Image (cartoon, grey):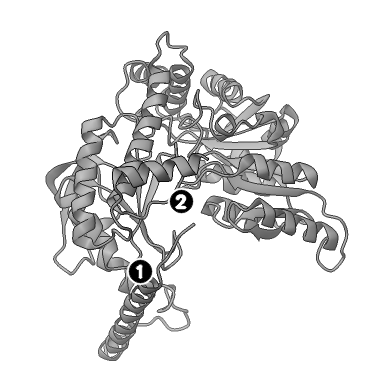
Amino acid sequence: MVRLPYFTALTTLFSYGLLFAFGQMRDLFRKILDLPKSKKVQGYAPICLGLEDFYTRRLYLRAQDCFGRPIASAPDSWIDVVDRYSNDNNKTLHRTSNITKCLNLGSYNYLGFAAADEYCTPRVIESLKQYSPGTCSVRVDGGTTKLHTELEELAARFVGKPAAILFGMGYVTNSAIIPALIGKGGLIISDSLNHNSIVNGARGSGATVRVFQHNTPSHLEEVLREQIAEGQPRTHRPWKKIIVILEGIYSMEGELCKLPEIMAVCKKYKAYTYLDEAHSIGAIGKTGRGVCELLGVDPADVDIMMGTFTKSFGSCGGYIAASKEIIQYLKHTCPAHLYGTSMSPPAVQQVISAIKVILGEDGSNRGAQKLAQIRDNSNFFRSELHKMGFEVLGDEDSPVMPIMLYNPAKIPAFSRECLKQNVAVVTVAFPATPLLLARARICISASHSREDLMKGLEVLSKVGDLVGIKYFPVESENSHAEAKLKKLE
């Protein structure tokens, strides 16, 4: 997946080693100098031990200004970024009253619904007047409005499943649902690059967890065969149930899962499938129905379909779609449903309106236009980045495009230089990615015009040359066309 050159790996390791060595020296001198005025509370262990927050203090703070930038506008194709400054070498950042208008290449507002919309916005405002911002209750008490019921029915119809259940947060949808579905005596087989919410959900379930190589059906089959033969640890009894968990689009790689091949393996070994479509639902497929539609997989074959409303629909929360029996079971057992405050009614209305636009039930063809636009924008931008010599991960049609940076010094340099030229990007490093594989994650939207994309490409090319992240030779038009034809074959 990532072709890390030997020299790049060597220089990246050296850079991290240098930062670690100087960080340890600074910690030592600080300990010596602060010893006379140390005010340790007797009998208490320190909450933050030196090594536990070393990365934050000695590496993250150097680039802190590149993360968590305050925004003063809707996450549209252009956003207002609040300017900040520091007087203590980035330890603390202070906001100013100045803003910088930037091209937004960081928000996962895939279909452009997060900004004002002629169909969605008036209905959201009306729901705010009728229901208020929050329900102040859980779903099983007074937190279920007719909007929640309508969205559950609409979401199930949209993804092609009999029933669905809503949650107020996308992360919790995974981390709370997985422990409700499987426990001790069960086996979870998870893709090695699954999202942290899946990882934490699997860990919290009490089930045995095994990992298969990213997007490799052959290795999944090896793991399944081996685990079925061995059975549970110590007792070697058969597993109570086996669930294979994967994502539609991997958020840090921009890759589509090999769903047909993985489904074939799961059917062969009678394993349940759990598909996370957080980044794929609404963004890909002819009618926006996600990776199943794009890759020709019947949604009925996928046992559990998870998705979020935070990307393509411009809202918040998540859903689980499955059989009526599974959804009914979750409504009685999942803590996130029983104890978590329900979705805000205006947020629910936003999703309902967005889905209706996608389906064309608003009386227009804007949904089809948005889907065509996000596909064209994504493929055009990815193609141009490849031609410029960037190392770009991901597949065609995916709106997520990671550009590899590798070296720790290039992370803040790339982000700051882009900001200087009015382009807002998201840079990602450890622990969200492996230590040596830092990257910038570009997210394309249907709201981007061709002029916006050309502006972004121009700036990225200049900054790429300046920072030195064009790891491949610039492609000519002929060579790129030949490579594309070979890929299609």
In the image, residue 55 lies at what x, y percent? Answer: 37, 72
Q: 224 or 416: which is nearer to us?
A: 224
Q: Does 407 appear above or below 71?
A: below
Q: Does 328 appear above or below 41?
A: above
In the image, residue 73 lies at what x, y percent? Answer: 24, 36
Residue occupied by mark 2: 253
Q: Between marks 1 and 2, how big is the CA–CA gap?
A: 24 Å
In the image, residue 162 lies at what x, y percent? Answer: 68, 24
In the shown orientation, is residue 122 left or right of residue 343? Answer: left
Mark 2 surroundings within 10 Å by alpha-carbon count, few (fewer than 14), some (14 through 19), many (20 or more): many
- Residue 382 appears in the rendering: no
Residue 153 falls in image quadrant: top right
Indicate the amino acid at tag 2: Glu
Q: 107 or 315: which is nearer to us?
A: 107
Query: Does dot 2 land on a helix, a strand or a loop?
Result: loop
What number is the disc on residue 419?
Answer: none
Indicate the amino acid at tag 1: Thr
In the shown orientation, is residue 206 left or right of residue 125? Answer: right
Q: Are marks 1 and 2 in contact (CB under 8 Å)?
A: no
Q: 382 or 85: which is nearer to us?
A: 382
What number is the disc on residue 56?
Answer: 1
Query: Does dot 1 land on a helix, a strand or a loop?
Result: helix
In the shown orientation, is residue 318 left or right of residue 436? Answer: right
In the image, residue 454 lies at what x, y percent? Answer: 22, 38
The residue depicted at 42 percent of the width and 65 percent of the height is 4
The residue depicted at 35 percent of the width and 47 percent of the height is 479
- Residue 148 appears in the rendering: yes
The residue depicted at 71 percent of the width and 44 percent of the height is 181
